[in-house]
Amino acid sequence: MNIPILFEDNHLLFVEKPVNMPVQEDRTGDKDLLTALKEMIKDRDNKPGNVYLGLVHRLDRPVGGAIVFAKTSKAASRLSDALRRRDMDREYVAVVRGIPPEEKGRLEHHLLKDKKENKVSVVKPGVKDAKKAVLNYEVLGRKGDLTLVSVRLETGRPHQIRVQLSTIGCPLYGDQKYGASVNRPGQQIALWARALAFTHPVKKEPMFFTSHPPDVEPWSHWELS
């Protein structure tokens, strides 16, 4: 499988995750990104034994775009700590149905995941096992009933962007789980991890990498390169 490498050194591996590929092994048994990258490194570098690759953050299976892995345990620990401290800036772009209530906004909800159904719902604060979710969005453009938005996460909850935008009446284009009433089966969800920025865990240099959605419907309505 051809997985675009955005950047690589002795400590980090930035790649562009293909859509509809799980980041790590799941119950489907489909080839996952983490395993594929380990196999790629082992074969390319002729490495004996197991290859270490640390999973720092995740993207939902339907989502493509920029994702970083750690090639050493030290880098993994420091990147995970940066994520906890919110020192890692993660920007997504999404195409949603409808028009958000404001050009710029901050969404704060409490989310509860049903692990059996693999679905997240918004609940009242104080519900057992619910977790606070916060994101900031900005409208970038409109085309008919579609709106292009930029999203920056303050927290990293499962399905967070999909659930929170759907809750304000703007489900993602193609999202069957949280927008089945306005999306057709077979449409690809329009959510892309566009940028990652943080300090290099070892060299202490600023790192910034971008990945652009493919020039297909609905992304093709806008110039995103």
Image (tube, rainbow, N blue to C red):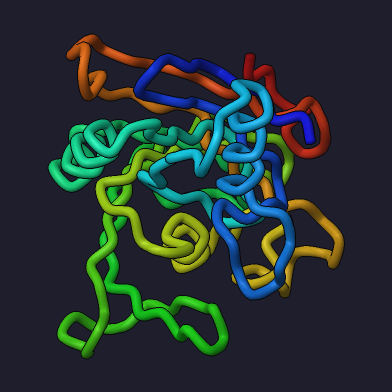
x then y, percent, for residue 38: 58, 39
Q: Residue at x 33, y 74 (%)?
A: 111
The foreground one among 7 and 220 is: 7
The foreground one among 24 and 122 is: 24
Task: Give the farthest residue toward the front.
Answer: 48
Quadrant location of the N terminus? top right
x then y, percent, for residue 140: 52, 29
Q: Residue at x 18, y 47 (%)?
A: 84
The foreground one among 100 and 206 is: 206
Left or right, 68 with reference to 174:
left
99 in relation to 1, above or below: below
Do we see residue 168 in this rendering?
A: no
Do we see residue 99 in this rendering?
A: yes
Quarter location, residue 224: top right
Left or right, 100 with reference to 43:
left
Q: Residue at x 66, y 43 (%)?
A: 36
Q: Residue at x 57, y 86 (%)?
A: 117
Left or right, 66 with reference to 160:
right
x then y, percent, for residue 207: 33, 15
Quadrant location of the C terminus? top right
x then y, percent, for residue 185: 85, 67
55 in relation to 12, above or below: below
